[in-house]
Amino acid sequence: MHKDIERVLFRDDEIQARILELGAAIAKDYEGKNPVMIAVLKGSFVFMADLVRAMDLPCQIEFLGVSSYGSKSETTGAVRITRDLEGDIEDRHVIVVEDILDSGLTLNYLLGYLQSRQPKSMEICALLDKPERRRVEVSPRYTGFTIPDAFVVGYGLDFAERYRNLPYIGVLKPEVYQ
Ligand code: PRP
């Protein structure tokens, strides 16, 4: 285990097992629908790669680059689009793929942004959900794990751009970020 990690929340094999279930559920629900999978960068790049390989289903892959305005604690929920979609989502079934759902402000904003492009349907698949922190109502159709309010990193999630490449999800030691 990395020296900055206090404890492992989900091992690599636990994450993969849950993603197989999510992929199977999506493949069943979207059979014959060729959904557009939109990964919200950067955190979701690892999850997206494993999720789409767990789906026995034709799908289109898209990436949306976003950056929060200001610091996390004082965010208004407005996000800046740093990299837009390449493909058209009008009249398509869309699944927004997120690594973590926290206050909900990012997804709330993004759903409005994407809705203006008139998809046929839009759902959320979030690997981690921290419902205790929610400030606006956002309901993912697919959730990997519900977690307590702890500072988690790894498997795509960072602190100051570090730890994204850890293969597991762990709780960061408080002395690292305090
Ligand atoms: C994380 C995560 C979501 C957002 C969730 O992104 O990927 O986009 O925070 O938080 P919220 O529900 O409170 O809005 P982050 O801003 O850390 O950027 P990153 O994905 O590039 O690491």
Image (cartoon, rainbow, N blue to C red):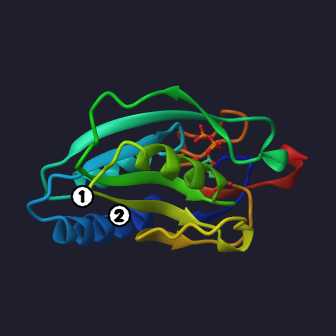
Position of 73 relative to 25 (above/below): above
Q: Amino acid at mark 1?
A: Ala
As displayed, is residue 172 above or below residue 22?
A: above
154, above or below 24, in the image: above
Asked whether the viewer can see residue 156, the reply is yes
Query: Where residue 20 appears, x then y in whole percent?
Result: 28, 66
Q: Is residue 36 left or right of residue 167?
A: left
**Which residue is found at the position 13% from the left and 56% from the top?**
57
Residue at screen point 26% across, 56% down: 120
Q: Which one is nearer the viewer's eye here, 170 or 52?
A: 52
Q: Which mark is residue 136?
A: none
The one of 91 and 35 positioned closer to us in this rendering: 91
- For disc 1, the neighbor class at 10 Å (few under 14, some 14 to 19, many from 20) is many
Q: Position of residue 53 (x, y in %)?
A: 23, 51
Q: Which residue is mark 1?
A: 54
User: Would residue 10 be found to the left or right of residue 33 on screen?
Assistant: right
In what element is the residue under mark 2? helix
Residue at 73%, 65% in the rendered image: 135
Q: Residues within 10 Å of mark 2 (few under 14, many from 20)?
A: many
- Disc 1 and disc 2: Cα gap in Å? 7 Å
Q: Quadrant of residue 169?
A: bottom right
Residue 163 x/y as whole percent = 62, 40
Q: Position of residue 161 (x, y in %)?
A: 66, 33
Q: Residue at x 27, y 63 (%)?
A: 23
Respond yes or no on whether mark 1 lies under 8 Å from ligand 1.
no
Q: Secondary structure at mark 1?
A: loop
Is disc 1 in contact with disc 2, using a CB cutoff of under 8 Å? yes
The label number, if any, that marks residue 19 in the structure image = 2
Question: Closer to the camera, 101 or 178?
Answer: 101
User: Is 157 situated left or right of 113 in this image?
Assistant: right
